[in-house]
Image (cartoon, grey):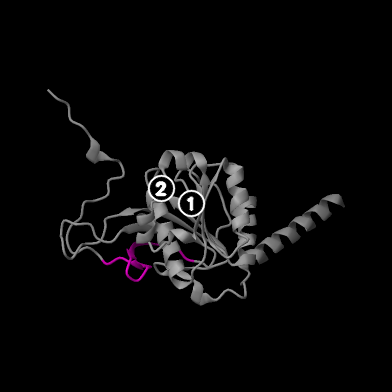
Amino acid sequence: MHAIARRNELARLRRRIADIEKREFAGIPEADDIACGPVSLARGAVHEFRAGDYRDAPSVLGLALALAGAASAKRAQPIIWIGQARDAFQEGVPYGCGLNFFGVHAELCIFVHARDAKAVLWAAEEAARHDAIVLIEFWKPHPLLDLTATRRLQLCAEQSGARLFLLRDARDEGPSTARTRWRLGPAPSAEDSLDERGLGRPRWSAALEKSRDGGHGWWVLEWDHAERRLVEAAPHSRGVVPAMADRSFEETTEVA
């Protein structure tokens, strides 16, 4: 009898989780969604961005800032950036001019430098209780960042309408309950109409690996600074240097 009761309880919990994941959340206007290419990133949800390679963390940060800037263009709200203090010490802190390029106003930003992964998750959960844009950096796999932790973040976001961007390393293959999951890397920048050797608008290679709303795909996205939005990039009219993930261009030759 005890085994039957246990199975019934597990079935009830599974149905409840499935209901939570499929629920449509009232009170969050669709017009407040932001576009990541052809895909809409809704409020009240966790959206996960993983680096395609260990060198692609700057690309992930850049796209997250572009999305934060696009969201700020629709409605001014706090941007809470949470990471570990040691990462800020090693990698540096955000630069005001760089934030401004993505339409992010420094006066709206709150930077949290937590001492460890546990403190990062605590701060993220507190931030998710507010109507804000929350960037959560996790550049190393950690057992605390599991399904339970991401589900707690998701539930907090649903109640507040917050939009959470979870930034993870390429080596981190841990599961999550994120509404969308992306794999990101750099792409050759757009052409500069005034200088053929100059750098145009930044671009990213973005693969949608999972969406709770269904579907997946791959796009090259471009940041339109004037309109403060991410758009699908037009193809280059001339050849560009191909991406070489194996770093073959760094090979050295022997000196005779």
Looking at the picture, tell me which residue is in the foreground, 117 or 11.
117
Q: Mark 2: which amino acid?
A: Ala
Where does the C terminus fall, quadrant-wise? Answer: top left
Q: Relative to 11, is 221 on the left or the right?
A: left
| Neighbours of disc 2 within 10 Å: few (<14), some (14-19), many (20+) | many
Please tell me which of labels 2 and 1 falls first in the chain.
2
Q: How many marks?
A: 2
Which mark, by number, is residue 167?
1
In the image, residue 230 lies in the stretch drawn in magenta: yes
* The quadrant where residue 253 appears: top left
Q: What type is the residue that disc 1 sits on?
A: Leu
On the image, numbered disc 2 is attached to which residue?
57
Residue 182 belongs to magenta span:
no
Q: Is residue 185 left or right of residue 142?
A: left
Q: Is residue 139 visible in this depiction of the protein?
A: yes
Q: In this rendering, is residue 57 above or below 159?
A: above
